[in-house]
Amino acid sequence: MQLIVNIPHHPYTLLIERGSLAKAGEWVSQVWPTQKITIITDNHVGALYADIVKTSLEVAGFEVLVFEFLEGEARKNLETVQLAYEFLVSNGMTRSDGIIALGGGVVGDLAGFVAATYMRGIHFLQIPTSLTAQVDSSIGGKTGVNTPYAKNMVGAFYQPDGVLIDPDTLQTLGERELIEGMGEVIKYGLIADVELWQELDEMDGSVASILEHAESLIYHSCNVKRKIVVEDEFDNGVRLYLNFGHTIGHAIEATAGYGEVMHGEAVAIGMVQLAHVAEQKGLMPAGITQQIRSMCQKFELPVSHEPWNPSKLYAALTHDKKARGQSIKTIIVPEIGTAAIHQIPIEEMKEYLDK
């Protein structure tokens, strides 16, 4: 299956195909001329897939290097970026060469930021291997790294030249790593895809069912994000819909310590918490919070977090990129399959953190 992200200045293709990882070289040769390539990955994904991708690229005529860093959200920072720059410089990477991100969302965000900023931008491709990365972070050109102040505070919009998605890589994920990606999939059904929500409703919530439905879940999620990104590349309008659950979710990630609560888990908690308060305020329909909670629980996603510290969460939230001056644009779901922007004074967010 293919989808075209038809951004006027930089259209690119998403290829969703089982077994495609071993044919990465053939795919890359259709996108890029022969050049030097650095695969950026982490030590966990690198051990599983770097040799497969490197060999395929070399057979296709590319010179290939591999830069690995220690896995985990805590490593997505400027220190790792500096190490990557040093690797690229020492190996003679030029503006005519390219970077491939091979891994989950942490790898894709960091590698994309390195590609966007090294020599003011070099070629970039995404090969996401986690469900979260396949359905969300590999698409749309958001790159970035964390700081002590907030998640993804330093970053750039930088579209890839293509995205290769092999659903078979999900089979090597740990159970928690696979399930956390369902937080983003559920979000897509809620904000824009009733058919996807119905498919989720019909699934039994098991790991086996996720793997069985993987291609469809990935396709539906990517198609929602593709449409939104094409309409609003730089996050000023409808692209904000993608942030449903993220305002509170990012604050949870930051206060818990990056990696303690996984991204998709935090999104699930954030969606339930925001819906709970928005429903009380009459902004979302009666009963929708329980629908969201039940769906998350079916897929064994967390729907609450302890310790819940409203003051710390609010402090983290005020550093969030969605805060604009003294207001913040929150996302609500008026009915399943639709989303809307609800701008409020940032002070009012304290009410959304009240258990």
Image (cartoon, helix red, strand yellow):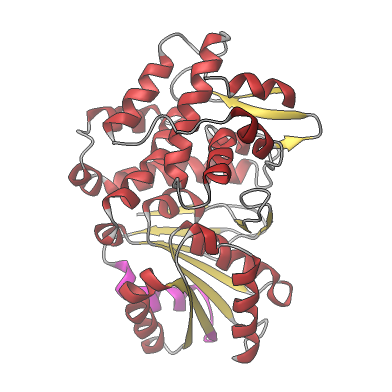
Residue 251 place in picture, x, y as percent: 59, 39
Q: Inspect the magenta stretch and tell me whether residue 180 lies in it.
A: no
Q: Inspect the magenta stretch and tell me whether residue 33 lies in it.
A: yes
Q: Is residue 227 left or right of residue 114?
A: left
* Residue 338, visible in the rendered structure: no
Residue 246 place in picture, x, y as percent: 55, 37
Q: Is residue 279 above or below residue 205?
A: above
The residue located at (27%, 27%) in the rendering is 201
Residue 30 place in picture, x, y as percent: 46, 75
Q: Which SS type dominates the magenta stretch?
A: helix
Check the image and name the residue furthest to the right. Answer: 325
Camera-nearest residue between 321 and 20: 321
Q: Is residue 173 above or below residue 354?
A: below
Range shown magenta: 20-36
Camera-nearest residue between 303 and 158: 303
* Residue 231, visible in the rendered structure: yes
Q: Is residue 70 left or right of residue 231?
A: left
> Which quadrant of the structure image shows residue 59?
bottom left
The residue located at (34%, 36%) in the rendering is 301
Q: Is residue 262 left or right of residue 208?
A: right
- Total numbered labels placed on residues in the image: 0
> Which quadrant of the structure image shows residue 49?
bottom left
Q: Is residue 234 left or right of residue 289?
A: right
The residue located at (30%, 74%) in the rendering is 22
The residue located at (42%, 31%) in the rendering is 193
Q: Is residue 345 above or below residue 249?
A: above
Question: Where the N terminus falls, by quadrant?
Answer: bottom left
